[in-house]
């Protein structure tokens, strides 16, 4: 369980990122963290991992204060950063040097993931492409069997087949004791993967709802004309792709991009629906 | 689980750090060996007359102290330098080892290993050259040629106790610089050292002038370990400990 209470964070007095943010994240879920550029997605993830320090507020990660960076907590965190550097060694040496720090590291699972990602095992990490390195680091992170998996833009640099592989692997990696948080601005990459959406906007959490809750309260469909029930719409070839209040309990598929834009532009209309 | 220090975890950390830092360390050591060999070679070779060679060996003191300072300060200045780069820092800060263990690994590589390695390459190079010179001048009085043992006896560290602390003080300052600055660690640390030493010298000189002017010196010819030597030792030791402590705190508070 992860608890954030009244988190205030800013890089400078002029650049306030979070104002009194509070939320709880539970195990057994894949959270999709969305937000515009500069909304603070990466910073929120860094706060959870103890890589930056908040001005005030409290963060509790499995009973630990992340700011203390205690080994017992770090063993439970797998952080896949957007930018990373891997040493000029082979995968075997990398695993030898790092895996021993994680008591639940699963070597067989790591080998299976590398196979699934089609990574040449004998190659030096420095000679690999960015996408291949990313796959290695994702495979390593998942093989640590850490309880909290944090991924910052994990699909950046992955080719189209790899993105599908990634979704498949992540879906199978979720267990009851794991909490997975994926931050991205490529919302389509998270289709059918996440079960809860968290959106950051204007220093606050603009939306935190399960996919089920969203599709229960909102309906995503194509309409020919706009009426007062439409909360947000985008023109398409055959009319409009619209987000509407789901008064008639209609089944619809969550369109993440549409929801994202709706939250950003029509937050006043959506607020009463989700409160 | 002990979240401050665990010997097994510390050993794992040393092995892990060696993979990345070991390369920088070995390359620097190789360059240092090359420079020392070049100094000996260019100064002493081709061998002419034994007395001339013996006189020219005077270059060893500046080489040992100046180049030794450069070597250990460069090593120390590069140890935490990667923490200034986001791409490297995140993975390193999140390795499940305590900040104390990470700091201790830094101390081991910079203050212990680098100092020992430099002394070792200096001794080996000197020994090799002196042995070669002795074998070349078989007929001359090679006893007058100061070997490395005589070099260390001549520059006996026991004659001034604070010298024992010098390598730790140097590495502590440059290790702090590597953790404190995000870029241009060596230059920035060197500038800070210059400014600090300048200010310190100015304060000490003026204080001494103010306190001791028009006073009569006593115990002028004491050759034993006088109190001032130990006071200086204590001040330098305290300074070194404070700098190491700041480095630890800085490492603990490092943000990415």
Image (tube, coloured by chain):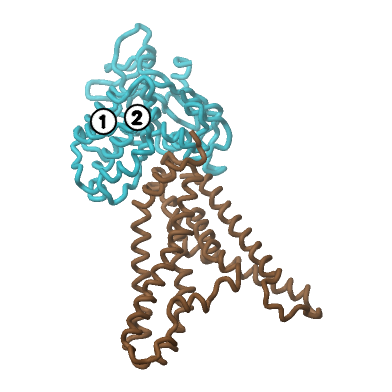
Chain colours: A cyan, B brown
Viewed as shown, does residue A128 lie left or right of B16? left
Q: Are marks 1 and 2 in contact (CB under 8 Å)?
A: yes
In front: B162, or B171?
B162
Query: Upstream in the sequence, badge 1 or badge 2?
Result: 1
Dot 1: what SS? helix
How many other residues sit within 10 Å of disc 1, few (<14), some (14-19) or many (≥20)?
some
Task: Name the residue carrying label 2.
Answer: A145
Q: What residue appears at the point 43 percent right and 67 percent down from the top-left corner?
A: B71
Instruction: Name the outermost residue toward the top.
Output: A248
> What residue lies at 38% left-to-right and 79% top-to-bottom?
B39
* Residue A191 appears in the figure: no
Q: Is residue B175 visible?
A: yes
Residue A89 position within the rendered picture, expressed as x and y whole percent measured from the top left: 27, 49
Tell me how far mark 1 sits from mark 2, CA to CA: 10 Å
Q: Position of residue A137 (x, y in %)?
A: 30, 39
User: Toward the viewer: A168 or A204?
Assistant: A168
Which residue is depicted at the point 24% across and 38% down? A158
Q: Position of residue A92 (x, y in %)?
A: 26, 43
Looking at this view, is A174 or A159 the one in front?
A174
Marker disc for residue A109: 1
Residue drawn at (36%, 24%) of the image: A30
The part of the image, by quadrant, that contains residue A12 is top right
- Tell me how many marks there are: 2
On the image, the x and y values in percent for residue A126 come to 26, 50
Q: Secondary structure at mark 2?
A: loop
- Chain identifier of the residue bearing label 2 in the image: A
Left or right of residue A211: residue B106: right
Residue B226 to residue A271: above or below: below
User: Does B5 sit above or below residue A2?
Assistant: below
Which chain contains the residue that carries disc 1?
Answer: A
In depth, the one of A265 and B122 nearer the eye is B122
């Amino acid at each position: 369980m992860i608890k954030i209470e009244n988190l205030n964070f800013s890089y400078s007095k002029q650049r306030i990122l979070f104002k009194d943010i509070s939320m709880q994240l539970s195990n057994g879920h894949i959270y999709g963290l969305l937000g515009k550029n500069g909304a603070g997605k990466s910073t929120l993830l860094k706060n959870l991992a103890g890589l930056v320090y908040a001005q005030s507020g409290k963060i509790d990660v499995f009973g630990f204060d992340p700011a203390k960076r205690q080994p017992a907590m770090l063993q439970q965190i797998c952080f896949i950063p957007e930018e990373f550097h891997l040493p000029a060694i082979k995968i075997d040496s990398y695993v030898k040097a790092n895996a021993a720090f994680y008591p639940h590291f699963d070597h067989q699972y790591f080998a299976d993931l590398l196979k699934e990602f089609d990574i040449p095992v004998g190659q030096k990490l420095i000679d690999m492409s960015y996408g291949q390195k990313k796959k290695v680091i994702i495979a390593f992170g998942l093989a640590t069997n850490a309880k909290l998996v944090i991924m910052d833009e994990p699909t950046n640099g992955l080719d189209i087949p790899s993105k599908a592989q990634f979704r498949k692997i992540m879906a199978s990696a979720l267990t009851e004791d794991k909490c997975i948080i994926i931050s991205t601005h490529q919302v389509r990459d998270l289709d059918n993967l996440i079960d809860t959406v968290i959106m950051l906007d204007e220093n606050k959490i603009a939306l935190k709802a399960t996919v089920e809750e969203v599709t229960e309260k909102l309906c995503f469909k194509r309409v020919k004309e706009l009426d007062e029930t439409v909360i947000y719409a985008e023109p398409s070839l055959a009319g409009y792709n619209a987000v509407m209040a789901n008064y008639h309990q209609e089944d619809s598929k969550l369109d993440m991009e549409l929801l994202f834009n709706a939250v950003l532009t029509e937050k006043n209309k959506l607020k009463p629906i989700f409160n | 689980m002990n979240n401050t220090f665990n010997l097994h975890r510390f050993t794992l950390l040393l092995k892990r750090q060696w993979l990345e830092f070991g390369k920088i360390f070995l390359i620097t050591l190789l360059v240092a060996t090359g420079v020392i060999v070049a100094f000996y070679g260019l100064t002493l070779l081709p061998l002419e007359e034994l007395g001339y060679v013996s006189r020219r060996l005077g270059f060893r003191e500046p080489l040992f102290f100046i180049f030794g300072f450069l070597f250990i300060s460069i090593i120390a200045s590069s140890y935490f330098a990667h923490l200034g780069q986001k791409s490297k820092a995140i993975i390193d800060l999140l390795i499940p080892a305590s900040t104390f263990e990470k700091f201790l690994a830094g101390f081991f590589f910079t203050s212990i290993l680098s100092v020992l390695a430099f002394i070792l390459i200096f001794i080996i190079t000197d020994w090799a050259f002196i042995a070669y010179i002795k074998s070349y001048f078989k007929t001359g009085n090679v006893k007058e040629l100061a070997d490395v043992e005589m070099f260390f006896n001549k520059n006996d560290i026991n004659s001034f106790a604070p010298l024992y602390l010098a390598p730790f003080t140097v590495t502590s300052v440059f290790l702090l610089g590597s953790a404190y600055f995000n870029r241009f660690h060596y230059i920035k640390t060197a500038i800070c050292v210059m400014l600090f030493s300048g200010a310190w010298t100015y304060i000490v000189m003026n204080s001494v002038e103010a306190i001791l002017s028009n006073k009569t010196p006593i115990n002028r010819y004491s050759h034993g370990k006088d109190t001032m030597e130990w006071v200086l030792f204590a001040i330098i030791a305290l300074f070194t400990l404070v700098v190491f402590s700041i480095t630890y705190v800085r490492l603990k508070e490092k943000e990415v």
